[in-house]
Image (cartoon, helix red, strand yellow):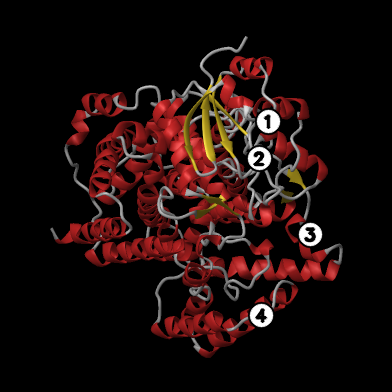
Amino acid sequence: MTRWLPALVVAAVVTALLVTLGTDISDVARYFVYVGLAVVLPGTLVYRALRRDPHSLVEDLAFGTAIGLVLETAARPAPWAWPILAVILLRRHLRTPHYPQRPPVAWSWAVAGVALGFVGYLGWAFLRVNPPVPVERPVDYMIDQLNLLAIAGDLRHHATLAVPELGAEALPYHWFAYAHLAAAGRLTGVDLPVLWFRLDLPALAVLAVALLAVAAWRVTGRMWTGPVAATLMYLVGEAVLPGRAPAFFGSITAYYSWSSRSVLYASALSMPLIAVLAQVLRQRHTTRTWLLLALLAAGVAGAKSTVLPVALAGLVCAGPRRAWRPFALLAAVLGLAMLFLYGGEGGGLIIRPFGIMADFARGRPLVMFAGLGAYAIAMGFRLAGALCVREWGPVERFLAGAALAGFAATVLIWHNSWGQHFFAIAGFPFGVILSAAGLHRIPVPGLVGACCVSIVAWNVAIPPPRLAIYGVYFFAALVLAVALATREVRAALVVVLFAGSAGLPYDAVHHANLGTAYHVRVTPDQAAGARWLRAHSTPDEYVATNVHRVGSGTQAEQSLAYWISAFSERRVLLGSWGYSPESNAIQAAGGGVGPALTYWDPARLQANDLAIYEPTPARLRWLWDQRVRWILVDRAQGRESPRLADQTSLVWSAGAIWIYRISGPCR
């Protein structure tokens, strides 16, 4: 019982957090029963059937859960069937094998502590400020959240993914994280916004911490590198004065861990991939290992498009003698993913060296080089442990190559929505495992020194944006001075590694939910109207609307209003177009920042809007031919023609939201 206590405490704390935030306990129970029976159990059986030798129970459960997530996506047409089939076919693996490794209780408590710290950050920075549905007051949702929720809603009802606000237009995208949410919603009956804004994120956070801890243990062969690597990844921020750095620094965990669900999902799947690749590079594999590697590579390819490229770069650094076969396998999986998942498109990525610094360098070489140095300090301090690694074999070169490739791609590639940062995030797990391998013990003076520099970071402000670059150098000098004052190499390394410890708490307190700078305000009436549509329409019935832009705040001109498809789980004929392949292509060609402001087919947009503002039988018949059966009007965006009610049926209204039904083709 003692060895299970840390896991039970984590489960109890997460449950208490969710209930405190108003989550129905029955929803919590249904979701965790689903994860246990439809993901963890069958995934663990498949992992036991494919792995080379048993290692530890925690490895079987953690890596098995990752396998379960991959197979859950593969079984989308019949999500209820694959767990039953797995249990029937692999029932002999239900028996717990003899495990040669059993982590001490202290190790389990350390991993549990990291998991709870990470969940605490997510709870304060995201969960507490994002109710699943606006009921009593308007809520400012970050724009990306509603777009991604709409994608999950689309996958819940359709076999192939489309841009939710552009009818049936195909969306080449890394959608596996959202398919997981769709499957959970279908089988549990839990409301999709509850899954999105409450249940899924803390569960993924705990899983990611456990997976990294186990992967680091397996890759390095030393148990305690696991909690250290997990701490560096999920509790320590960048070596900057928190909240003061220029935008180009980005981050690894702060902001990105909650703003893009695919980041955390892909990070989780990356950990067993790294561990299996390390086994292959050390030539400790069987035929089943290759099947396991192919399965994990396929899952990672669909989870985030940036992971396999950095892994391939790492294999190049490992050397051809041992790496050519895993390189060929991963390259083949990536090629298939580019063809079938991404449609051969680049997603708006273009080669543009140092593009992340264009907003402040403005062609000045000295400022650009100063920015590069500051970027290396900010991101590199947590990876300094790699300098203390004594033996550099193929695995160590693989880890270092993948981490460096992630940063190189971020610096050399440009994306109109700053998507190049995802390469650095994809490579970071490789780097923290290597860095943790260089830290053999944690002296107390080092922890004291790290606390001191964190206190300074919390309280010292540097005026942004340009002076913040030099503030990084000031902070680095302070860190190095404190490190040298410890007079011991390992203590000094601890100060450097944990110098950014104030980053995540500062972000949660001062920048929860990214403030309101990139948000759309959703009123209770808007949410209620969208949810009424969900209850009274079918997934094959499209919605026409006059809502194309955010309509408030500094992003008022941008076409990023996804609340209709997010809360209705219905496709909109022509709503917002900012997050679409065409928008990315237009901005990439023109070197612009952000989404395209104008729609590329003005005749189609005019036909959509005229059917609302100047309806005629012919215009409404055009909507009908486009599979539109409902018209949602937000009068804050423009008032519909009085003639619309004469030619359709008004079925619901509240405040500025009016919903009409087209009963048949108008003659």
Q: Give the mark nearest the N terminus, 4 or 1.
A: 4
Q: Which residue is mark 2?
A: 638
Mark 2 vs 4: CB contact within 8 A: no
Q: Quadrant of residue 205?
A: bottom left
Front position in the image: 499 or 102? 499
Residue positioned 64% across, 40% down in the render: 579
Q: Which residue is mark 1?
A: 613
Image coordinates of residue 473 in percent, x first then y, are 68, 78
Front position in the image: 147 or 402? 147
Q: Is residue 291 visible?
A: no
Q: CA distance from mark 1 to mark 2?
A: 8 Å
Q: Give the mark nearest the N terminus, 2 or 3.
A: 3
Q: Which residue is mark 4?
A: 462
Question: Alpha-carbon neighbours of circle 3 within 10 Å: few (<14), some, or many (≥20)?
Answer: some
Q: Quadrant of residue 370?
A: bottom right
Residue positioned 81% across, 70% down in the render: 367
Mark 1 vs 2: CB contact within 8 A: yes
Mark 3 vs 1: CB contact within 8 A: no
Q: Give the mark nearest the N terminus, 3 or 1.
A: 3
Q: Give the mark nearest the N terminus, 1 or 2.
A: 1
Q: Which residue is mark 3?
A: 358
Front position in the image: 150 or 490? 150
Q: Give the mark nearest the N terminus, 4 or 3.
A: 3
Q: CA distance from mark 3 to mark 1?
A: 42 Å
Foreground label between 2 and 4 = 2
**Amino acid on which the number 3 mark rests in the picture:** Ala
Mark 4 vs 1: CB contact within 8 A: no
Residue positioned 66% across, 25% down in the render: 611
Foreground label between 2 and 3 = 2
**Amino acid on which the number 1 mark rests in the picture:** Tyr
Residue positioned 34% across, 63% down in the render: 116
